[in-house]
Image (tube, helix red, strand yellow):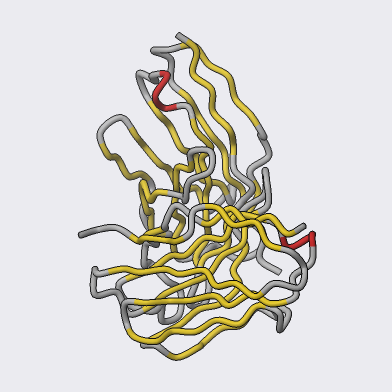
Amino acid sequence: DTEVTQTPKHLVMGMTNKKSLKCEQHMGHRAMYWYKQKAKKPPELMFVYSYEKLSINESVPSRFSPECPNSSLLNLHLHALQPEDSALYLCASSQVPGQGATNEKLFFGSGTQLSVL
Amino acid sequence: SQKIEQNSEALNIQEGKTATLTCNYTNYSPAYLQWYRQDPGRGPVFLLLIRENEKEKRKERLKVTFDTTLKQSLFHITASQPADSATYLCARSGYSTLTFGKGTMLLVSP
C-alpha cells in the first residue's frame, strides 16, 4: 500500500463550526506533514510530525490544531476558521524525518478542498 | 531566505516535442532538488530527485539537470504527450522539509 488517504475530499464549514481533517498511511513512514495550498500557489508547510511528535509548527494560527494519535494517523482539527483559510489541505508522509538537508521524497494524499463560509 | 523560483507560469507545446521547464534558486545550493507533478485538485506526485553533485538524472522520458554555477535545474520531458499536461513543481531541500516553487503549468496539444 503506497497511498496516503485523506478524508473528507471536500468540506464546507461555517466560521463557528468545528471540524476535523483525517489522514492515514500504512507505509510505515515516521514523518507526516500538513500543507496548505491556495489556487495557483505552491504548497506551504504548516506542521511536521516526527515519530509522532510535533517537530515543526510554521507559525500557524491556533485555530488549526494538529494531532498524531499513532504512527499511521494524522488529524487536523479546525475551529473558528476564517474565509481566507479556504484552500486545499494536503497531508504527506516520508519514510524518515529529514535530518539536515533532506533527500526524503514526500508521498501526498489527494487533499481536502476546504471552503469556509 | 532561501528561495526557489519557477519563472514560467505556463508552457504550451505540441505533442511529440520536448518540454523544458526551469527552476532557479537563490543563495547557497540545496543539497537536493526534487520535481513533482500535480494534477488539478490532487496532491503532488514525486517524479525525480537530483543531488547537488549530480549533473543529470534520467527516468524514462524524463531528465533533470542541476547546474550549481547557474543556480538552476532544468526538467525535460521528451516525446511529450497530452497526458503529460499538468503542473510541475520543483522543490529545494531544507532542514527537515522542502520548499516548493510556484510550479509551471504544462499544456501539451495534440
Residue B28 in percent (x, y) is at: 60, 65
Give the residue at the far left of this rendering: A1
Q: Residue at x 48, y 46 (%)?
A: B42
Q: Is residue B3 above or below residue B78?
A: below
Using the image as rendered, state which of residue A53 and residue B13 is in the foreground: A53
Q: Quadrant of the N terminus of chain B?
A: bottom right
Q: Nearer the viewer, residue B16 or A63?
A: A63
The percent coordinates of residue A76 (x first, y second) are 54, 75
Q: Vertically, is A56 above or below B65?
A: below
Total marks shown come to 0
- Going by the image, does B97 lie left or right of B48? right
Residue at image point 34% right, 34% down: B62
Asked if one can make out residue A94 in the rendered structure from this viewpoint, the answer is yes
Q: Residue at 50% of width from left, 48% of height from top? A: B67
Q: Residue furthest top?
A: B110
Residue furthest bottom as drawn: A53
Q: Position of residue A78 (x, y in %)?
A: 64, 74
* Image location of residue B83, percent across then percent down: 39, 24
**Residue at position x 41%, y 27% from top?**
B84
Please indicate, yes or no, whether residue B25 appears anywhere in the rendered image.
Answer: no
Q: Is residue B89 above or below residue B14?
A: below
Q: Quadrant of the C terminus of chain B?
A: top left
B93 on left or right of B101: left
Which quadrant holds residue A3? Answer: bottom left
